[in-house]
């Protein structure tokens, strides 16, 4: 009987616990995947990836994915008081003119001209508090950036987006400074 019980007992060695490095790598990969998912469902490419004309109409120029308003693309002069009650978007969908002035979508790539030197704290402050470049004493982010909705994200989701953006192709593109309307 004891021999039978002994034969039925599982004596195979237990699987070793994964190393901390493997768990950290898996966790980081999962975080990046979650960030990519969030960037896609939150439609970040709609404003931060310039549009180009295709045979099916305007579509995102994925060679410039998340690089913001093209540096060399000038807009015609528009007086913000002439567009009261309206918002005008340029053809690349990366610049908006409204009562606040003219705003340009930022370069979200990990290039010097983008988010390369941003900390997670700055990124969080930009999304939670609507602060330009995530700096505590900076001006508010301008429309159409929907930071008021994004402020509801969890710390984990913000960290995931930040992690993903650090993995995209860096694109050198210095976006023009916003042009604030008088009194802004």
Image: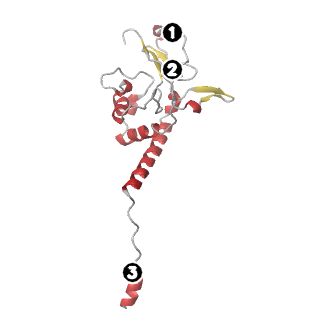
Mark 3, secondary structure of its residue: loop
Q: CA distance from mark 1 to mark 3?
A: 81 Å
- Circles 3 and 2: CB atoms closer than 8 Å: no
Measured from the top left, where is residue 126 in percent x and y? 37, 29
Q: CA distance from mark 3 to mark 2?
A: 69 Å
Colour mapping: secondary structure
Q: Which residue is at a point 45% across and 41% down the rendered structure image? A: 35
Mark 1 surroundings within 10 Å by alpha-carbon count, few (fewer than 14), some (14 through 19), many (20 or more): few
- Circles 1 and 3: CB atoms closer than 8 Å: no
Mark 3 surroundings within 10 Å by alpha-carbon count, few (fewer than 14), some (14 through 19), many (20 or more): few
Q: Nearer the viewer, residue 21 or 35?
A: 21
Q: Which badge, 1 or 3, is on the more N-terminal residue?
A: 3
Q: Which residue is at a point 40% across and 33% down the rendered structure image? A: 150
Disc 2 designates what residue? 95
Measured from the top left, where is residue 140 in percent x and y? 36, 21
Disc 1 designates what residue? 78
Q: Nearer the viewer, mark 1 or mark 3?
A: 3
Above or below, comparing residue 59 to residue 91 in the picture: below
Name the disc covering residue 43, or none.
Answer: none
Mark 2 surroundings within 10 Å by alpha-carbon count, few (fewer than 14), some (14 through 19), many (20 or more): many
Q: Which residue is at a point 54% across and 32% down the rendered structure image? A: 65
Q: Residue furthest right?
A: 55
Name the disc covering residue 9, or none.
Answer: 3
- Left/right placement of residue 121 relative to residue 22 reads left
Quadrant showing the N terminus: bottom left
Mark 1, secondary structure of its residue: loop
Q: CA distance from mark 1 to mark 2?
A: 12 Å
Measured from the top left, where is residue 95 in percent x and y? 51, 20
Q: Which residue is at a point 36% across and 36% down the rendered structure image? A: 120
Measured from the top left, where is residue 131 in percent x and y? 35, 25
């Amino acid at each position: 009987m004891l021999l039978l019980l002994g034969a039925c007992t599982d004596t195979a060695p237990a699987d070793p616990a994964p190393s901390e490095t493997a768990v950290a790598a898996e966790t980081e990969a999962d975080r990046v995947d979650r960030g990519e998912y969030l960037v896609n469902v939150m439609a970040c490419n709609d404003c931060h990836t310039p549009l180009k004309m295709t045979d099916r109409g305007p579509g995102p120029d994925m060679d410039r994915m998340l690089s913001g308003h093209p540096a060399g693309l000038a807009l015609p002069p528009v007086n913000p008081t002439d567009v009261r009650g309206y918002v005008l978007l340029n053809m690349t969908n990366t610049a908006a003119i409204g009562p606040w002035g003219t705003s340009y979508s930022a370069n979200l790539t990990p290039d010097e001209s983008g988010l390369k030197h941003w900390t997670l704290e700055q990124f969080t402050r930009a999304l939670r508090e609507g602060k330009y470049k995530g700096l505590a004493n900076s001006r508010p982010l301008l429309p159409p950036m929907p930071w008021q909705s994004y402020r509801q994200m969890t710390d984990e989701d913000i960290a995931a987006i930040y992690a993903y953006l650090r993995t995209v192709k860096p694109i050198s593109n210095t976006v023009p400074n916003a042009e604030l309307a008088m009194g802004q």
